[in-house]
Image (cartoon, grey):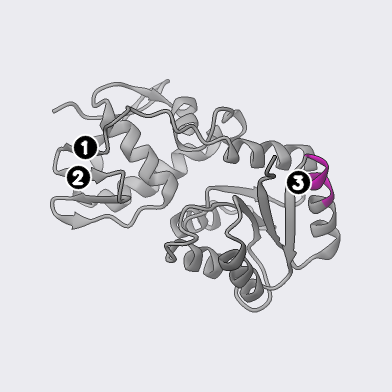
Amino acid sequence: MQHQKILVVEDEKPIADIVTYNLEKEGFEVAWERDGGDGLRRAQDLVPDLIVLDLMLPGMDGLQVCQALRGDSRTRDIRILMLTAREEETDEIVGFNMGADDYVTKPFRVRALIHRIKALLRRNSATAPGRDQISIHGIEIDRLHHNASINGVSLDLTPTEFRILWTLSSQPGRPFSRHELMDMARGEDANALERTIDVHVRSLRKKLSESADLIETVRGVGYRLQRK
């Protein structure tokens, strides 16, 4: 049986050691780098299933590494969980805009971190069979080639934003709960991740620009895309 590979990029060795130990105990194959540039090169060579990426790193910082990973076709779809000592929402939004899939602040509980990692890895790929393109409200989505545009203008979306837009566009008018959206975007067990959906949707609306209102908030439920 092939083990899932996780790369830990963290300059504080005690943190890296405890994360590595617990991930290996869960059956994962773990690699570790303490420098941002070395972490980027290791990711390009290893192509892991998930990267635990610290924000404050020597060499390249975590946001620079994240941006480089998302700009490379070989590493674009790797799940990224970012670690940081900062708690400000602005840092969280910047992290997601750069392409992070989740965001955990230090200090953290190891069990909670492992839960979040497992949830990210349990990506739900159950989407409509044989359907790889959607066209609605000027939005064009090509799932096969991972392209999205609106009114002819290409959208630079993170993998999570892309999956959320695909999910909403696949059933216009249907309200999706935050839990459902995180199931579609990340994995079957998204309870611990539900709090981040508003950040992703806010970023997605910003990228839709004048068409941001196409994504409607359904009070007490979640979000939907306008009907035709």
Task: Count the marks.
Answer: 3
- Secondary structure under badge 2? strand
Query: In the figure, 174 relative to 87: above or below?
Result: above
In this rendered view, identify the residue nearer to me: 202 or 186.
186
Which region is colored magenta? 21-26
Mark 1 vs 3, N-terminal side: 3
Which amino acid lies under the numbered mark 2 shown in the image of this protein? Answer: Glu
Instruction: Give the camera-side residue of 207 and 31.
Output: 31
Q: Tag 1 or tag 2, which sits nearer the N-term?
A: 1
On residue 36, the disc is none
* Residue 38 image-quadrant placement: bottom right
Q: Residue 137 location in percent, x, y?
A: 14, 38
Residue at 53% across / 53% down in the picture? 78
The amino acid on which the numbered mark 1 sits, given as a three-letter code, is Ile
Crowding at mark 1 (Cα within 10 Å: few <14, some 14-19, many 20+): some
The answer to whether the residue labelled 2 contacts the one labelled 1, judged by CB atoms less than 8 Å apart, is: yes
Q: Going 26% across and 33% down the picture, which residue do you hit?
A: 131
Give the quarter of the figure containing the C terminus.
top left
Corner quadrant of residue 10: bottom right
Image marks 1 and 3: residues in contact by CB distance under 8 Å: no
| Residue projecting furthest to the front | 1
Q: Which residue is mark 1?
A: 134
Q: Residue 108: which numbered mark, if any?
A: 3
